[in-house]
Amino acid sequence: METLIPNKIIEWIPYNNLQNIEYLTRGGFSKIYTADWIDGRYKEWDSNERKLIRYGSHEVILKQLENVESASQSWFEEAKSHLTISNKYAEIVQCFGLTQDPSNGNYMLVMRKCDVNLREYLQQNHDQFIWKEKIRITFLIINAFYWIHEENSIHRDLHSGNVLYSQLNNSWHISDLGFCGPANKSSTCIYGNLPYIAPEVINGKEYTFKSDVYSIAMLMWEISSGQLPFINYEHDCNLAINIINGMRPKIISEIPSEYKSLMEQCWDADPLKRPDINTLRFKMNEIMSYYQNKPNELPQLKVKMDNVTNNNISSKLFTSKIHKFENLPEPKNATKVDVQNDYDEREIMQQQSNIDINDEVQNNPKLHSEEQYEFEIPDDGF
């Protein structure tokens, strides 16, 4: 029988042991809160007193499911999967246990709180990044996913909002396993953040290990560029069709060739041509080992960054939700002509967007209207 160390014990946490509960954000079908756990998790076994010693008060995240009456079965599957995986591997955001809000009967996961998500981290630090650090972060994310796949589970909703950074340990963790479950479990809807969803899933196929690998490719691109993928596109049927037809984010010129090649393999339209997580982890480790011996140099980013990368727009667009598309073509890789035509079209769209934005600013006497704050709240994955 396996013996758990004290800080890995999963427990029922009385709701009255949680104080200063404050609403944080909304992610998918869940509401997210911060709280102070007044006793805190178990820390160690006192052999003299023969009892478990608690850590003391610390901040935690509460993840609550809405409409628990109609979705309780899927939520408990999530809870079981998350509790099992997170308490085996440090790379997954840890769940300390469960609690229940007595005011509405809703159950909540009580989870470790991290400092910032990857999306925010890149926005704050990307100009100071060297390639050695970008590659290290990429490897750590892939390594975390290795353990999820080793548990025969698929994440199904990977994006930079649910890859979390802990400053205390300088470590990266995967969160929001909202649709994580057995690999052979079928999905009846397309749920996720559209730029990160694999083309075959958009086309109605089931989520697989290889669809997770596609999402990792989008993270690789985001880490390399510091931008959100397809930020100038509405998350609608037009973007879905473009992705299925092979459109991918424009690759910056300074990207290492080995990194670029691996990323392109991961976002291939054919899932069978994407590497599995074992191969991906091995190749990324080779790249990381090589760059550890390279001198520290800041990359000179020559690619023109989009002018609309601000928190308001990312809040509006980069939210996981249910998508429904019908009568879509089969996924394919874009030709070089397709890619160039798309970049030309995007440049025209960006120029027009800048004109529209400038006109709106010049003609709008009230720049901070109430409507400005009515954007969707992103799925931050805490």
Image (tube, grey):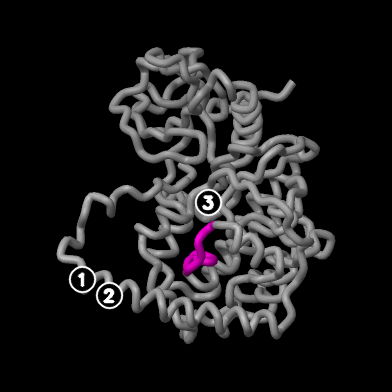
Mark 3 crowdedness (10 Å alpha carbons): few <14, some 14-19, many ≥20:
many
Mark 1 crowdedness (10 Å alpha carbons): few <14, some 14-19, many ≥20:
few
Relative image position of residue 85 (x, y in whole percent): 65, 35
Is label 3 in a helix, a strand or a loop? strand
Q: Residue at x 80, y 63 (%)?
A: 270
Q: Which secondary structure dominates the residues rendered in magenta?
A: loop
Camera-side residue of 236 and 216: 236
Residue mark closest to the camera, 1 vs 3? 1
Q: CA distance from mark 2 to mark 1?
A: 6 Å
Relative image position of residue 249 (x, y in whole percent): 59, 72
Residue position marked by numbered label 2 in the rendering: 359
Is label 1 in a helix, a strand or a loop? helix
Q: Which numbered dot is residue 163?
A: 3
Whichever of callouts 3 and 2 sits on the residue coming sooner in the sequence is 3
Q: Is 281 left or right of 91, judged from the image as shown?
A: right
Whichever of callouts 1 and 3 sits on the residue coming sooner in the sequence is 3
Magenta range is: 227-235
Whether 130 is among the magenta residues is no
Q: Is 79 left or right of 368, judged from the image as shown?
A: right
Q: CA distance from mark 1 to mark 3?
A: 39 Å
Q: Which numbered dot is residue 363?
A: 1
Q: Which numbered dot is residue 102?
A: none
Mark 2 crowdedness (10 Å alpha carbons): few <14, some 14-19, many ≥20:
few
Residue mark closest to the camera, 3 vs 2? 2
| Circle 2: residue type | Asp
